[in-house]
Amino acid sequence: MLSQDLANIKEEVLESIEKANDLKELNEIRVRVFGKTGLITNISKGMRDVLPEDRPKVGALINEVKTAIECKLQEKIELLENIELNKKLEEEKIDITEPSKDSELGALHPITDVIDRLTDICVDMGFSVVEGPEIETDYYNFEAMNIPKNHPSRDMQDTLFITEDILLRSQTSAVQAREMEKRKPPFKIVCPGKTYRNDNDATHSPVFHQMEGLVVDENISMADLKAMLTILMKRLYGEDTKIRFRPSFFPFTEPSIEVDVSCPSCHGKGCSLCKGTGMLELLGAGIVNPKVLEMSGIDSKKYRGFAFGFGLDRTSMILNSINNIKNLYRNDIRFLEQMKK
Amino acid sequence: MKVTYKWIKDFVDVNATPEDIANRLTDAGMEVEEIIYQNEHLHDVVVGKILKIEKHPQADKLVVCQVDIGKEITQIITAATNVFEGAVVPVSLPGADLVNGIKIQKAKMRGVESCGMFCSGEELGIDENYYEGAGVNGILILPNDLKIGQAIDKALMLDDVVFDINITPNRADCMSIIGIAREVCALYGLEMKKVNFSYDIDVYAKDTVRDYVNVEVNTPNCLRYMAAAITNLKIERSPLWMRAKLNAVGIKPINTMVDITNYVLIEMGQPLHAFDQELIGGRKINVRQAKIGEEIEVLNHNTYKLDESVMVIADQEKPMVIAGVIGGTNSCINDNTKTCVLEGAVFDLKSIRITSRKIGVRTDSSARYAKGVNVANAELGIVRALHFVSKIGCGKVVRGMIDISSVKNEERKIEVSVDLINDILGLQIDSKIMVKLLNNLGIKTVCYGKKLQCIIPPYREDLENDYDIAEEVIRLYGYSVYDNMQYDLFKNAKVTEGEHHPRLLMERKFRNALVERGFYENVSYTLVPEESPKKLLLDDIRANIIKIANPISEDIACMRTSLAHSLFSNIAYNISVGNRTMKIFECGRVYLTEELPLVKLPNEINMLGLAVCDEGYDFYILKGVVESLLSKTSATYKLERSKQPFLHPGISADIIIGDKVIGSFGKIHPQVAKNYDIPNNVFYAELNDDFLIELEPVKRVFKNISKYPIVERDLAVVVDEKVTAEEMLSAIKSSCGNLYYNASLFDVYRSASVGENKKSLAFKIKLVDMNKTLTDEEVNKVMQKILKSFNYRFGAVLR
C-alpha cells in the first residue's frame, strides 16, 4: 500500500519536474514534495503506523524515492540555470565594432620613426649615437672636411649662411671632425639630425634630415663598408636587399662611392619608384680621406676609416610610400594619422 | 658638361656604341645623365629637288610640286611661297615625326594627293646661326650641291650623339672633350690619337707678335698669360663641321674667330679671348687688379663697377675684360676686325670664383676657370686655335708667341704601395693589373717590388697619394667586384660597444607616452619668420632671433626660439584645412643667443613641446600629461604661476627645479591665440630635455608599512577662492603629524549656496599608526586639529 503510494508519488513528481519550465515552478514542486505538509514529509510521518519489522524496508524505499526526486530536481535546476545564463549572455551581447574608449592613439612622425629604427640597428653593430650643432662653423662644416674656402667642391651644395663663418650645417658630416677631436680610435659613431640647404622645390626641402656614420680603426677597408651597409640596408628594407657601389666624389672620402640599393618596391625588377632601373641611389660613402683624419689630429699612417651619409627624408618616404617631401613638414593630421598602421 | 660621340672620335678610334660608352663612363665615375640623339626627329626627312610646280586645281593658295627624292619622284602640295622649280629642299616623307610634333602621312589636300611636306629650318630644329636659310619664314632652301635623296641628318651634320655628363669637382680636366676622350681611351684600353697642333706661318714675313702687342702681368692671380696675333682676319660663317659640333653641345655659332675660341674652349677646356688689336690702347695689355671706381661694359650689356678684388685685362687706358669671366664691348672682335690678338691665359681659381660670385656672372669660361684650369693647358689651347685659323684659312698667324708664366707645372712622380692600395680596397688586385690600368689612364707607372712609381700628368692635379691612386685603380677595375663579395663585418676591426644617445632615449619615452595619449608627433621647419617672437609676446632672450644672411624666403628666414611658434602655426594650418581638434607634439631644438649678430655658436636647446586644440580639454588634463612625462625622469619639482608671456597668466604654471624654470604649461594667452588665428582654448606645454637628462638619477628609499589598518575620513570645507589646494593639503599634513598617511582633494564645488568667490573643497584624509590600531577618539582629535588649522589659516568653515 505504502509502497504503491510512493511509486505513484515518484512517477507523478518526476513527470512534473520534467515538465517544469522555470525555477519558480521547480521551487513549488520542491515545497509540494518536501515542505512541512509535503507528500514525502507526510509519508515519513506515516512511518509510525508501519510495523517495526517493516520499517527498515519502507525507510529505504522512502529514501530511494527522495533521492531520485532530489537528483532529478537538481538536474533540472542546472539545466534551467544554464538556459537562463545562456539567454542572459545572449542578451548582453554588444557591438564589438563600436569605437574603443579612453585609448585614443596618436602616432610618431615618419622621420623620427626611421631614426629610431636606424639607430637601434647601428647600436647593435657597435655604433654610438651622437649629435652635433645645427648652427655650425665654416671650419667643421667645410674646412675640416677638406673643403677649403673658394674650392670647387663648395659648388656641390648651396649653403645657408648666418655670418661669413657661421652657417647652417649643410651635411651631418660636420659632426665627423668634432667627434674625431673628442674620441680616440677605435670608434664607431652615427649622427642623425637636421641639415639645411638653400634648396626649395618639388623634391627638395630647405630643412631635411641626414644620418652620418663614421668608423675609425686600424684595418678598415671598402670591404668593411660593403659588409656594414649591406647589413644596415637588409635590416631596413628586407633580407633580399642588395647593394651596389658606383664611383663618386666627396672631398672628405677617397675613394668615394655612391651606394645603390635594390629597389624595395619592385625588388630590382624596375618600377616607377626606381624609374625602371631596379636600383635606388641612396647613400654616399667612402674611405675617410687621410687629410681629414690628419686635420682632426688622428694619425693617418696608423688609422683608417670609412664614412657614409644618407637622407632620412628619402628613407622614410621609401619605407612608407610617401610621394611628396613637403608633406613631411606640413604636419597635417590627415597625413600623420596614416602612421598608425 | 656636354660632349659628343663624333667629337670624342676625333681623339680616339673607338667603335663601341654610344650606349656602351655612356655605361662605361658612368661606371667609372663620369656619370652620363642623358644621351641625346640629335636626329631623333629627323628620320624620314631627305634632301629633295623640286622639278615642277603647278597650280592646285581646287585651291588658289596651294601648289602641286613634283619632287625628286632620289629613289623616286613624289608629289607634294605646299602653301609655301619661297619654293621654285630647281630648288633643293628638305622633304619630310610619310613616317616622319618632326621636332614640333608634326607627324607626316600621305593625305589628300582638296582632292589631290600629297606625299610629304617641305620643311623650314625651325621644323628641323635649327636656326639661321647654324645654317644659312634656316631662319627664313618659309622653306629652307638648301645648296644645289647636296646629294638628292640623302638623309637630312647626314646632309646637315645633325647626326651626332650628345652625352650630358656630370663632372665631379675633382675632375676639372674632364671639363673638355679631350679629357673625356682620355677616360674613354683608358676604359677601352686604346691609344689617344695625335692631336693636330700644326699651323702655317709665313716664313718670309718679318713681323712678330711683339709688333702687334705687348703684355705685362701685374697680379699674382694670373698664373700664365699667352698671346698670339692673327692678321688678315676673315670674319665670316665658320665651316659646317665646326658649327655642327658647337651646335650639338648647345653653343651658338657666330663667326670664324668666335667659333674657334668656343670650339677650343669645349674641346681643350681652355678659355680663349680674341681682342681687336686696333682697339687695344697703346697696343699694350696689362693684367692687373682693377682700381676702385673703374667701370666696364661687358658683352651681356651690363656695366659693372669694379674694385681691387676683381682682376682685369686692361690696356694703357681702360679695363677690356673682367679676367676669366666676361669680355668688354670696348675691345672685342667685330665684323670689321682685321687684326686680332688671341689670349690664352690661366688664372687662380679662387680669384675667378670671388669675381664671378661678386658680379653674379657665370660664363663657360668662368665655369672652367672656377674649377681650375691647368697651367700647361694655355699653350695647348692657343696652339690648337691657331691650327684651326690655318685650317679654315680665316687669317694669317704671326710668328712668335708671348708667354708669361709665374708657375711651373710639370709632371710629378709619386710612389705608392700596392699593399696599401689593396688594404684600402679590401681586395687583392695584382700589381700588374694596377700598372696596366694606370698606364691606360696616361699615368706612366712602373712596379718595383711592392711599390708603384707613377708619373702624374700635369692635368691630374687631383692625384697625390695612395688613396687617390686606389680610387683610380678601383674605378677602372670596376666596383662590380664588390657586388657579390662575402665579407665578415669588421673582420679586422676592434669590437666597440654601441651606445644610444641618452637624451634621445629619454625623448623616445616621452614620444611613446604621448602617442599613447593620442598625440601626433610633428616635425616642423626650424626656420621661422622674423616676427615669430613678437607673435608670442616674447621679450627675453628668445626675442634675439638669429637671421639667415641668404634666406630662401621671408617665412623661413630665421632660427626659431620657441617650439610654441611651430606648434601654434601647425594648429593654425590644420584648422585651415578642416582638422579642428588635435593633440600634437614635437621634440626639437630652439636656438638662443645673448649676442647678435652672432660671434660664436648659439645655444641649441632640445625641447619637447606639446599643444592641444580641443573644446573639452582643460588645465588639469594637461597637468596630468605633464606629470606623466616628468614621472619618466628623475625630476622632483615644484610649480609656480607661469611667467611665460604666451600663456594665460592665471591658467598656467612654470615647472621649477632648484631655481631653474625647466618647463611651463597652461592655456594659451588670448592675445597670442589671436596672433596665430587659433581658438582661445588651446593648451600648450614645454619641457627642457637637455636639463632633464642632466638630473641625478633618483635614489629610492622604501619606508616600512604599518601592520595596522588605515583609517579614512572625508572633510568638506568652504574657503575663499584665493586659497590654493596645495596650501590646504600641506596644512593637513602638518596637523596629522606622524599619523599622516596621505591626503587628497577629491571634489571642488562652486555654487550660489557656497557663496560668491568661495569654493567648497572635499578632502580624503588617510591616517595610520605604526604601532597600534587607531581609535575613533584619536582620529577625531586629529580631525579637530585639521579643522582648527583650516579655520585659523584660511578662514575655512565646515560645510
Image (spheres, rainbow, N blue to C red):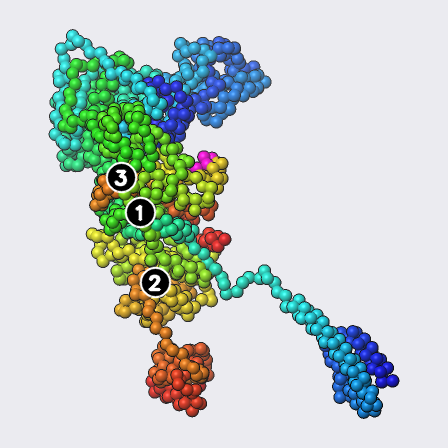
Residue B333 versus residue A222: which sits nearer the camera? Answer: A222
Q: Which residue is mark 3?
A: A289
Looking at the rendering, the stretch of residues picked out in magenta corresponds to A276-281
The amino acid type found where label 2 is placed reads Leu
Q: Which residue is mark 1?
A: B494
Q: Is residue A319 above or below residue B513?
A: above
Is residue A47 or residue A74 the one in the foreground? A47
Say if B111 sits above or below B615 in the image: above
**Residue type at numbered disc 3:** Asn
Mark 1 or 2, nearer chain start: 1
Which picture quadrant has residue A297?
top left
Q: CA distance from mark 3 to mark 2?
A: 41 Å
Bin the neighbour count of mark 2 within 10 Å (Cα to Cα): few under 14, some 14-19, many 20 and up: many
- Give the numbered dot on residue B687: 2
Q: Position of residue B331 (x, y in %)?
A: 20, 24
Q: Camera-side residue: B694 or B449?
A: B449
Label 3 to label 1: alpha-carbon separation: 21 Å
- Looking at the image, residue B561 sits to the left or right of residue B486; the answer is left
The answer to whether residue B479 is left or right of residue B170 is: right
Relative horizontal placement of residue B248, taking residue B408 as reference (left or right): right
